[in-house]
Image: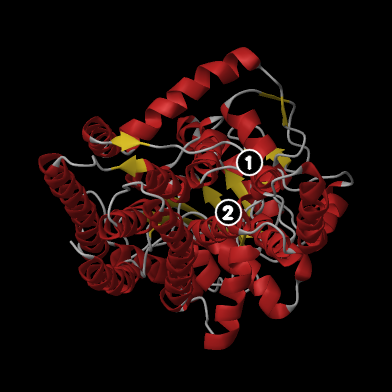
Amino acid sequence: MNVRDQEVWSFRIRVAFWVLGIVLGSIMAYTGRYYINGDAIVYMEMGEALRYGHWWGLANLTYSPGYPILLGLGQLIFQTAPANELQVLRIVNIFCLVLAMGACELVLVFVKNDLDQRRFQGENPLPWPLVSALSYGMFLVAALALIRMRLMNPDMLVMAVVLAAVAVLLWIRENPIPYWKFVLLGLSTGVGYITKSFFFPFSLVFFLAAGFSAGTLKRAIPRVTVAVLIMLVVGAPLLVALSSRLGRFTYGELGRHVYALWISGKGEPVHPEIVNGDPKVTLYRYAIPCTRPSGFDICYWHEGFKPAIDMVAHLKIIPRNVWSVFTQIPWLTFIFVWFVLQWWTGSAVMGSVLPPSLFLLLAVPALAGLGFYCLIHVEPRYLGPYLFLGFVALSAALRLPEDDLKARRHTWIQSGVLAGFFLLLVFHSTIDQSLRGLHSTTEKPSYHESFVEHLSVRDFLRNKGIGKGDYAGLVGNLPVYWARMGHLRIIAEVTDPRQFFSATPQQRKTALDSMKNAGVKVVVGMGARFAQLSSEGWQRVPGTRDYFVEMLRDRRF
């Protein structure tokens, strides 16, 4: 393939990337528009804090404000209400996808520059149409199959920020003299911290990489210092607000909480109020307006439950997390096989350490990101940007054999098969997620049917005189979007439904009375077992599969 043909195919591949990404992403966002993930209410209510000027609502010890700020702007622009925000604010997810696609383009610009330079120097890297097709395909898999468009969470925005920061690193590598490139690195890492708190420690990877890229220590120190200061200036309002809430320095408490929860912790939470012992009823009184205080800022309610460093337990969980990456994302095996085959027939060049090669500036953030999550807890959607960067690093490192036409033909065929496999994964994910959003089964309702059930619960409670500002309680960890649509506030919970059902009728009555004393007017549960409690006042909500309510307002002591 001559140079002209490569340019034509590269252009076609780029156009296909943008068309497929936006079209398939929009389809996923549309078919999943009624999906309500567990954190969606929190992010939308943090967005409302921006919309209505409740600034302390953005100072959340658990969830970072970057994505909620975008949701708040969307709420302002489209004037959303709880009944339509799930559908309308999917536009924000599409916007985040476009940002991530743009950041992907920036990374690949610098990758192409490096490969062109090496080709000019006599090396024989993979043809650019192959590298771009594989890289675009891997991006679409990471964004649409791993992160997914139906989820209301910041992971797509995190991908955009990570790739933007890596693009700045690659730009610094080309010419580390200008200070303003380091200013951009500080801005990107600062925005990263506002988007997700893990970026505060993770930014060290970018600063070290930028320092090594500067060439000399004398040149690196002042420039990296500028980048660090810019990041701290961008993140200062959040750092001050979070630290003020706790009375000590913190950049966010989620990492400490996850360690205590998943590995080793000690102590008891200090903020929740236990108002009944058996079954246990917990009261959540919270100054910031929100539907469900217990879920709005999880780390606040677990303050006092602290990490207890246990290296033995920690070392045991790391291999399990690494293994879970491959069990949850089994198609990574195909990438491994493809890379080994390419290396076998050609070669792979990792490049120099000082100054760092393109491979290192892509692979180090990728490995650091994967390692960060493997330390404690892994979910596939967290890994999207790092798997993409790692794959691009491997693709850019490969070299074709010089004079073996048969081996070159095999490279084209094998790489074409892998690119086709990526597209198959994306189309399968689009179809699978769309079908789950549109069709109900006997086991699970569709996303739309679930949303309609929330409307039914809201309307049922309204007809019972339960409305805006009233307090509600829960038995179990059930979806609560009905409460947001009804402007209710869930202040009391029985967190262990097994304990509730194993209690005696008198014990259950005592637990419910403790809720009523706290001002709760209705308790909601979910599950067929509540039908067994109809003699105690529980009634199924018409129009739902298994939502049940107990009207405490009508109870007599």
Question: Residue 549 location in percent, x, y?
Answer: 46, 57
Residue type indicated by callout 1: Val
Instruction: Please tell me in which quadrant of the rendered image residue 168 appears.
Output: bottom right
Residue type indicated by callout 2: Gly
**Is label 1 in contact with label 2 (beta carbons under 8 Å)?**
yes
Above or below 448: residue 530: above
Number of other residues with Cα within 10 Å of mark 2, as a class: few under 14, some 14 to 19, many 20 or more:
many
The one nearer the camera, 216 or 211, is 216
Residue on which the image places disc 2: 473
The mark nearer the N terminus, 1 or 2, is 1
Instruction: Please tell me in which quadrant of the rendered image residue 450 appears.
Output: bottom left
Tag 2 secondary structure = strand
144 sits to left or right of 279: left
Tag 1 secondary structure = strand
Question: Residue 454 location in percent, x, y?
Answer: 41, 66
Which residue is at 24% across, 71% downward?
4
* Residue 532 can be seen in this image: no
Residue on which the image places disc 1: 281
Above or below 152: residue 537: above
- Give the spatial CA distance, label 1 vs label 2: 9 Å
524 sits to left or right of 206: left
* Residue 433 can be seen in this image: yes
Q: Name the outermost residue toward the left.
A: 406
Q: Name the outermost residue toward the top.
A: 312
215 sits to left or right of 32: right
